[in-house]
Image (tube, coloured by chain):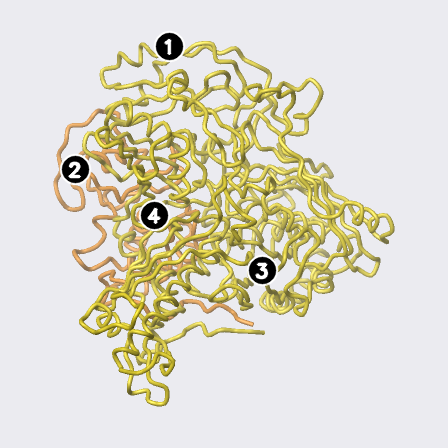
Amino acid sequence: MRMNGGEVTRDVEPRVLLVHYIRDVLGLTGTHWGCDTSNCGTCVVLMDGEPVKSCTVLAAMAAGHDIRTVEGLANGATLDPVQQGFMEEHGLQCGFCTPGMMLTARALLDRNPDPDDAEIRQAISGQICRCTGYATIVRSVKWAAKNPLGTDSGTGAAEPGDTPATEDVKA
Amino acid sequence: MTTVSEHAPNPAAGDPSRPIGFGRIQRKEDPRFVRGRGNYVDDIVLPGMLHGAILRAPVAHARLLSIDASEALAHPKVVAVITGKDLEALNLAWAPTLSADVQAVLVTDKVRFQGQEVAFVVAEDRYAARDALELINVDYEFLPPVIDARKALDDGAPVIRDDLPGRTDNHIFDWEAGDAAETDAIFASADVVVAQELVYPRVHPAPMETCGAVADYDTVDGRLTLYETTQAPHAHRTLYAMVAGIPEHKIRVVSPDIGGGFGNKVGIYPGYILAVVGSIVTGKPVKWVEDRSENLMSTSFARDYIMQGEIAATKEGRILALRTNVLADHGAFNATAQPTKNPAGFFHIFTGSYDLAAAHCKVTGVYTNKAPGGVAYACSFRVTEAVYLVERMVDILARKLEMDPAELRLKNFIKPEQFPYANKTGWVYDSGNYEPAMRLSMEMAGYDELRREQKEKRERGELMGIGISFFTETVGAGPRKHFDIVGLGMADGAELRIHPTGKAVVRISVQSQGQGHETTFAQIVAEELGIPPEDIDVVHGDTDQTPFGLGTYGSRSTPVSGGAVAMVSRKVRDKARFIAAAMLETRAEDLEWEKGRWFVKGDPSAGKTISEIALGAHGTLTLPDGVDGNLDAEVTYDPPNLTFPFGAYICVVDIDPGTGHVKVRRFIAVDDCGTRINPMIIEGQVHGGLTDGVGMALMEMISFDEDGNCLSGSFMDYLIPTAMEVPDWETGFTVTPSPHHPIGAKGIGESATVGSPPAVVNAIVDALAPYGVTHMDMPCTPARVWEAMQGRTRPPV
């Protein structure tokens, strides 16, 4: 299969799940595993550009396909705008669902560069986040939509000092 | 009202949009997470590492007759199978819980809940370990289980804990707070008394990362390195030393990146101990990571309180007293993670935000054949249950009095001038200013307009509800003299080192599970010393690298460790003053501080920055007597009191009268957590908690059938809100600093989880008023709402 742009070939047991292949065989631990039932979406990767839950795909079924994980999102030192958006808009807390959420967001923006809130929520509705309450994830994806080229300093070094997307109301 | 600036820029930095200190900055931890470079327990791979899996009991109550592991041991990839008998030989079959009970690590005598740990397989890979579980043959003699807590104390109920000498029933404790006689007297003469049973169902924190551990025991020097999903690495290390007899200095507990905790990762689970035993037995590192069903079925649940609430008031709506009897289902072992002296946690804050003449609560804890736990899921040690009780009862009273629920609350709030306020059950609220928060939430919601809309919709037969919750939390345990966990006082340490070039490292004893400690604590140092947050590293989650402290739960990181970090920064600042004086050849008392530098009073041009002082400290300068050559300090912070964050929440729901489906249309949350360190992180904490609240109110519940089979053992059955079930949150804030906290901060991690469920339920009950519904228990699933509309409300099972 192609993994983040490079060819990889391994012999695996027929029953090995793609998520375990990615994590345990290839050592790409950015893809997570969170449930046994295909409900949580922490294992989402892109298969030929479409989000799939890698716990429901056998590694062998991915043979010959193009797989993209969170490790393949950035272009070298330059982050994907989605990655920048998640940092700008606090779209992550514990970071466990984040790779899957970002990959789904990438696939959404690839087919719909200017999604509205409802479309973003629909796109991530198969994935669970326990920390953020989703609103900041929606904002993160919108940030990426508004900044399709990201920002100049998009290297992911902690750059303090930005403007909040929505202001709290203060008494 | 006291307010503080959201952005406190360094005057020297010249760029007010870059706060050096408190304000909105991006998180320092995010660059690794967005690249998939987090380091969670299951990401850890050690040379020669083996994999463990746990065989779990298929039934809730059964005597263990025999275990035959010979087939499993014959599996070519199986290295060891450990049973209760093996642990008995090591004196490790039972481990102490955090609530003065014991819990079986592996079953030796009988199974006490479905999913309990029966045997542990160690194999060469995770698939083989799972395969081998199928090869273990266990014989059980099935016993009748106790599932309904209401029947746990019946005569003739099966005795679950016959392992405890002399035990003849399922009673764990009775505990009470407040003055019963005084409360009863007020109830006897009150104009209006309303009673309601409230069931807070069993729910589960279900962090996205399940629990797990990698144990690496070095058989040569007897040193154990344990990577585990824990919110309290230091407390765990001490407990392992006490339980396993490994000297504490030979144990290193590492809590790497944690994929959410919410109280699920406070206690010590059998799986952690089994990974350690597995490593000792095999001489190799052993990884154990539970799956989702194991997480939901066996690890710490939350709530499971059946509360009989009563509220007394005058007919004009002056609330006089509140009382409650609670039946608390603790499961098969009393393993709640809470301060030793508080078997019902901080439930006795159930007087809430109101100035009452009397209050009394009695809590009875019982054993049932269910998983142990009880204090988890961002509950602030059962403040969730307390807030739900008082906020539902106030709403029920409002209905009875035909008063607006906002008006009733405003009429009964503790007044600003009453703080510090001693309530009737022993708490002293540090500070509060409730009315402005309530008014702000009503203004944001457009409360009067919503009520008008509701009236119009009711005339058309549409179901719209508006629910209010005004909560007061008690967090930040705590003063050591009052609060301990298994004898360990609830204080936290901090160590701060300023390197010669002025960059800093601060080591803290609390552990982030996503709260953003690496950012928040850097900002506290930045605020105190004027060092930019990006120049400050925060080290946490490694007992070899950090000072002792009790860890992150009960919203205690900012109230306790935040205090520690502010104090250690001030210690450095004080020391810097003497060094600066030596550098400037003046007296320390002639120097004045501005953020980032000491300068000579009256001559601002003569000064030294923290960076210059750090170099001075490590340089060749002759230092004053008693000042050693560094710019480092350490403290252990013992808070003088808890902190009392509060907030006003308003929820708007629409209900489909045909299906009972509840849509949360809007949710307005005004929080007051005192001084605000990073508004972005605070908002994130609130959003997450609100989602928890909507989840509990609408869909989350761990339920059992009458045989004790867990019916919520996967995410197909234990429902958690997705992006489709929650609205775009509307947040606001007021700022009432804590008077005793070094920076006035109160903590925010659990406010929304604690405060939001009653707002949602109040909104639902309000929407159902045309059907005569005055109460319904969570979870308000479509079927249960529809039943309520038919006049058939029932407690959840």
Question: Which amino acid does the dot numbered 4 rest on?
Answer: Gly
Q: Nearer the viewer, mark 4 or mark 3?
A: 4
The residue labelled by disc 4 is B541
**Residue identified by numbered label 2:** A1
Q: Respond whether the residues carrying marks 1 and 3 are from the same subunit.
A: yes
Task: Output the letter for the chain in yellow.
Answer: B
Query: Disc 2 on helix, strand or loop?
Result: loop
- Amino acid type, mark 2: Met
| Residue B23 at least partly seen | yes
Task: Give the structural element (helix, strand or loop) at label 1.
Answer: strand
Chain for colour orange: A
The secondary structure type at the circle numbered 4 is loop
Q: Quadrant of the N terminus of chain B?
A: bottom right
Of the image marks 1 and 3, the number of the one nearer the N terminus? 1
Determine whether label 1 and label 2 are within 8 Å by CB.
no
Instruction: Give the CA distance from mark 1 to mark 3.
Output: 56 Å
Q: Chain of mark 2?
A: A
Alpha-carbon span between mark 4 and mark 3? 29 Å
* Location of mark 3 (residue): B646
Query: What residue sits right under mark 1 in the picture?
Result: B68
Disc nearer the start of the sequence (4/1): 1
| Residue at image coords 58%, 21% | B160
Compared across the picture, whether B101 is left or right of B438 comes to left
Between the C-alphas of marks 2 and 4, the distance is 38 Å
Residue type for callout 3: Phe
Foreground residue, B342 or B631?
A: B631
Question: Which element type, helix, strand or loop, lies under badge 3?
Answer: strand
Q: Is residue B732 left or right of residue B434?
A: left
CA gap between label 4 and label 1 equals 40 Å
